[in-house]
Image (tube, grey):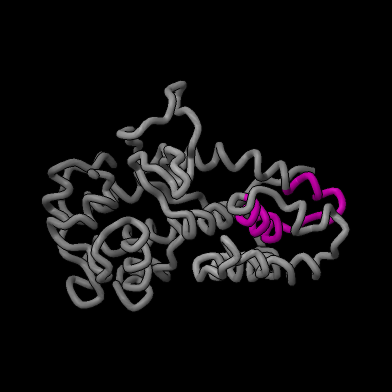
Amino acid sequence: MSLTISNNGINLIKRFEGCRLSAYRDPVGIVTIGYGWTKPIDGRPLTMGMKITQAKADSLLKEGLKSYEAKVNKYNGKYNWSQNQFDALVSFCYNIGNIDGLTANGTRSINEIAAKITSYNKAGGKVLPGLTNRRNAEKQLFLSAPSSGPESPEYTYKDCGKEVQSAIGAKVDGIAGSETYSKCPTVSRYKNNRHAVVRPLQKYLNLLGYNAGTPDGIAGTKFESAAKEWAKKNGCTVDGEFTKGGKSWKKILNLV
């Protein structure tokens, strides 16, 4: 039986990949967009200057993951992966390219695979903190007990937009524009930390793979940490704050 990656696995990948909605050149000069997409989009070659929406980036990621799911499913007959094991390995595969080496072409045991995951934390012979953190997260997920019960429906960017608009008194259509942006307040652990807009921000940061904690409408330490991590990955000021009239609101509303 073939497995597909869960929302939990997708969020893990989003957390470490980061997302850029404008085309850029990666470290080796390849034009890239979204969560590492390098292929044509809707029949158009990917070129510098192209922009996409967050929804399109999410769609491209799911499309791109299919080939990596196949590479992990290649060994499912031998290992009978749990959902958490499968999710962790698809994340690993998306970053490394395959799991042939990790599994030694299917000759390693589950415990040996788990132990080997964290050794893939180098680039150019040097240990990288980002890779170390990713491998640790993948190993933790790989070894965690299978979750019980069906997943709840995925919270989408448009859902977030509608909740933000409702919270600030803007037109509720899920499409952020100048009116929505102009009404977004400063929100942080120390300013407006119980504003109605906090809850959709928590939910959306969680969707993107940043741990903003339980969506309780209170901007606490987890919200601050998630906001800082998101800001660092998205070229915004790393202060844990969504500032009225600032780049962080523009970025998360897909206005830049």
Q: Residue at x 63, y 39 (%)?
A: 66
Q: Is residue 100 above or below residue 146?
A: above
Residue 126 in picture, x, y percent from top left: 56, 68
Q: Position of residue 14 (x, y in %)?
A: 48, 54
Residue under the image location 42 percent in, 38 percent down: 31
What's the magenta region? 72-93
42 vs 119, nearest the viewer = 119
Q: Residue at x 75, y 43 (%)?
A: 2
Determine the residue located farthest toward the front in the rendered image.
Answer: 124
User: Is 91 one of the magenta-colored residues?
Assistant: yes
Give the image quarter of residue 46: top left
Find out whether residue 192 is within the magenta segment.
no
**Quarter holding the N terminus?**
top right
Task: Answer with left or right where residue 170 lies relative to residue 68.
Answer: left
x, y percent for residue 253: 26, 48
Q: Position of residue 111 (x, y in %)?
A: 80, 70
In the image, taking residue 227 as reference, residue 111 lies left or right, namely right
